Amino acid sequence: MLRSAYGHKPAEVARALRAFGGLPQVTVEDAATIAGALDLAERGMDFADALHLGRSADHDVFLTFDRRFVKAAQAAGIDTVRG
């Protein structure tokens, strides 16, 4: 929503989510996975895709029909995502 409706860049959205998650009254589940997903989102990967990828880190391969996800993962140096 922040990107599509308001035109914010991925890095701006990631910084805002990091700031929100760092508030004392906010609890973040699986902070390491979220942080990794935000790192990838800052580099241009869709946050939801990055989050799914992080949650599947203990698997050998991530299969998807989403060609853009495969290309974004390859651009980020991740070779476990296959279409």
Image: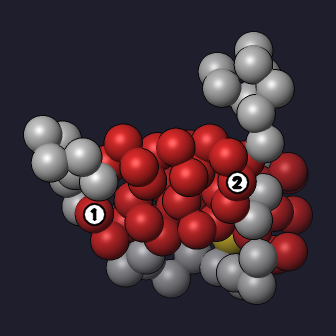
Can residue 3 be seen in the rendering of this structure?
yes
The residue that appears at 41% across and 49% down in the rendered structure is: 19
Viewer-nearest residue: 72 or 6 = 6
- For mark 2, what is the residue? 11
Viewer-nearest residue: 74 or 66 = 74
The residue that appears at 15% across and 48% down in the rendered structure is: 24
Can residue 45 be seen in the rendering of this structure?
no
Q: What element carries label 2?
A: helix
The residue that appears at 58% across and 51% down in the rendered structure is: 14
Residue 5 horizontal/vertical position (percent): 75, 15
Task: Give amino acid for label 1.
Answer: Ala
Q: In this view, does 8 lie above or below 77?
A: above
Q: How far apart are marks 1 and 2 (CA)?
A: 18 Å
The residue that appears at 24% across and 46% down in the rendered structure is: 23
**Residue 80's image quarter?**
bottom right
Residue 55 horizontal/vertical position (percent): 39, 62
